[in-house]
Image (cartoon, rainbow, N blue to C red):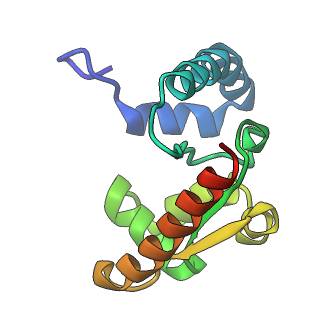
Amino acid sequence: MHPDGSLNRAALRERIFAAPNEKAWLNQLLHPMIRQGMRNALTQTTSPYALLIVPLLVENQLQTMADRVLVVDVDEKIQIERTMARDKVSREQAEAILAAQASRAQRLAIADDVLKNDAENQKLLPQITLLHQKYLAMSRQNL
């Protein structure tokens, strides 16, 4: 923990990578609460469709909670660079983080839809708009 009481994510990450048994303990502690929180959020949804944002969907086998799986995809080189920038870690640490996760191929294998996120944000808007229209149409069919 940081002195202000907030979570020290870097220290937690180091500890989890160093001790798989502690990672398993943490997952067993947190995942039931996370799943219940997701269920609660879904039951309160009033919009035509809902998105569950789950960074480790495949690893935690949470795809069963969704009707469809949208994978935001990027090639590994960009993913490493973004991880380094976001987490302020070395290339080796970023590679270790990604090695502990499902592979790109595994994520794409469960995808119903894919959003390519390897370009500038303005290039994402047309993809997002098409997906939104698709999901709206699907929600109307399910009413």
Q: Height in image: 129 above or below 33?
A: below
Specify whether 5 is left or right of 110: left
Residue 142 horizontal/vertical position (percent): 70, 47
Q: Nearer the viewer, residue 85 or 123?
A: 123
Residue 136 horizontal/vertical position (percent): 53, 58
Residue 89 horizontal/vertical position (percent): 39, 58
Residue 117 horizontal/vertical position (percent): 47, 76
Q: Nearer the viewer, residue 132 or 16?
A: 132
Q: Height in image: 107 above or below 101?
A: below
Q: Nearer the viewer, residue 101 or 12?
A: 101
Count of labels shown?
A: 0
Q: Height in image: 90 above or below 81?
A: above
The image quadrant where one finds the N terminus is top left
Q: Height in image: 112 above or below 2?
A: below
Residue shown at the point (74%, 24%) measured from the top left: 21
Residue shown at the point (48%, 64%) measured from the top left: 132
| Residue 90 sits in quarter | bottom left
Specify whether 51 is left or right of 10: right
Residue shown at the point (50%, 38%) measured from the top left: 13
